Image (cartoon, grey):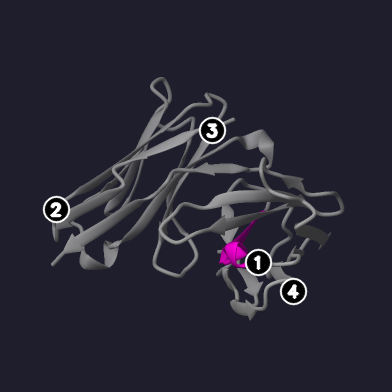
Amino acid sequence: GAVVSQHPSWVICKSGTSVKIECRSLDFQATTMFWYRQFPKQSLMLMATSNEGSKATYEQGVEKDKFLINHASLTLSTLTVTSAHPEDSSFYICSATGLSNEQFFGPGTRLTVL
Amino acid sequence: GENVEQHPSTLSVQEGDSAVIKCTYSDSASNYFPWYKQELGKRPQLIIDIRSNVGEKKDQRIAVTLNKTAKHFSLHITETQPEDSAVYFCAATFNTNAGKSTFGDGTTLTVKP
C-alpha cells in the first residue's frame, strides 16, 4: 500500500517556540493531505485540509494563524505550530489521499510543550 | 456537516467470541465508509471499507455491513483474538469533498484470553 511518512516522530519544545512537522507521501502523489490532532483516548479531530498549491481549508475553531499549513508539492505538506503552549501538546497525524478516497496515515508526531 | 456516532465506546469479549461495533451517520451524501484499527501511540490502520453501492463486505474474520436507508454501518469481528485488542474507529466520507472523513469517537475493544 501507499506509504506516508511524518517527521519528527516526537518533539519537546519550550512554550512560545514554533515547531514544524513534515508529512510526505513516499510512493504516490497526494492530491489532498489532511492534518489531525488526537488527544489521549479521543478520536481524530480534523484540523485542516491541504491541497497542493492552494491555501489550506481549516475546520471551525482551528486558528489558521497558529497552525500554519504549507503544501508545496504533491508529496509534501508541513504543519507549523506557532508560539506553542502546553495546551497544544497532542498527537498530530497527517494523512494523504490519491485518486481514491482511501486515506493513508502518517505515523504521527507526539508534541510536548513544556 | 456530517455527524458520526459510534457505539459502544468500550467492548470486552472473551477470546473466540464475536464483536460488533455500530456507527450511524447523518449526511446521506456520504458514500465511503472505512474502519480503522489504532493501537496505542500508532497510526490508524485501514482494516476494511465499504462503498455506498455495496451492502456487505467480508475479509476473513472481518465484515462490514451498510444500511444506506437507515444510515448505519457495522463492523463484525468473528473468532476474536487477543491481538484484536485496540481502538476501532469508523468514518464517513463524502466523495466530492476530496475524501474528507468524519470519524466516530472510537471503540476500545478488549479481547480476554
Residue drawn where x is 58% and y is 53% of the image: A103
Q: Which mark is residue B31?
A: 3
Q: CA distance from mark 4 to mark 3?
A: 41 Å
Q: Say if residue A10 shows up in the picture.
A: yes
Q: CA distance from mark 2 to mark 3?
A: 30 Å
Q: Which mark's residue is nearer the viewer, 4 or 2?
A: 4
Q: Quadrant of residue A27?
A: bottom right
Magenta stretch?
A85-97
| Relative height, residue B22 to residue A111 (above, below) | above
Q: Say if residue B66 shows up in the picture.
A: no
In this rendered view, identify the residue nearer to me: A34 or A69: A69
Q: Which mark's residue is nearer the viewer, 2 or 1?
A: 1
- Secondary structure predominantly adopted by residues drawn in magenta: strand
| Relative height, residue A38 to residue B105 (above, below) | below
Quadrant (top left/top right/bottom left/bottom right) for the C terminus of chain B = bottom left
Q: Please tell me whether mark 1 sits on a helix, a strand or a loop.
A: loop
- Sequence-wise, the earlier of marks 2 and 3 is 2
Residue drawn where x is 68% and y is 70% of the image: A26
Q: Which residue is mark 2?
A: B17
Mark 4 packing: few (<14 Cα in 10 Å), some, or many (20+)? few
Q: CA distance from mark 1 to mark 3?
A: 38 Å
Q: Please tell me whether mark 3 sits on a helix, a strand or a loop.
A: loop
Q: Which residue is mark 4?
A: A17
Q: Amino acid at mark 3?
A: Asn
Outermost right residue: A53
Q: Which residue is mark 1?
A: A85
Task: Determine if marks 2 and 1 fall on one subunit.
Answer: no
Parent chain of label 4: A
Outermost top residue: B69
Measured as percent of width and height from the top left, residue B55 is found at: 38, 31
Parent chain of label 3: B
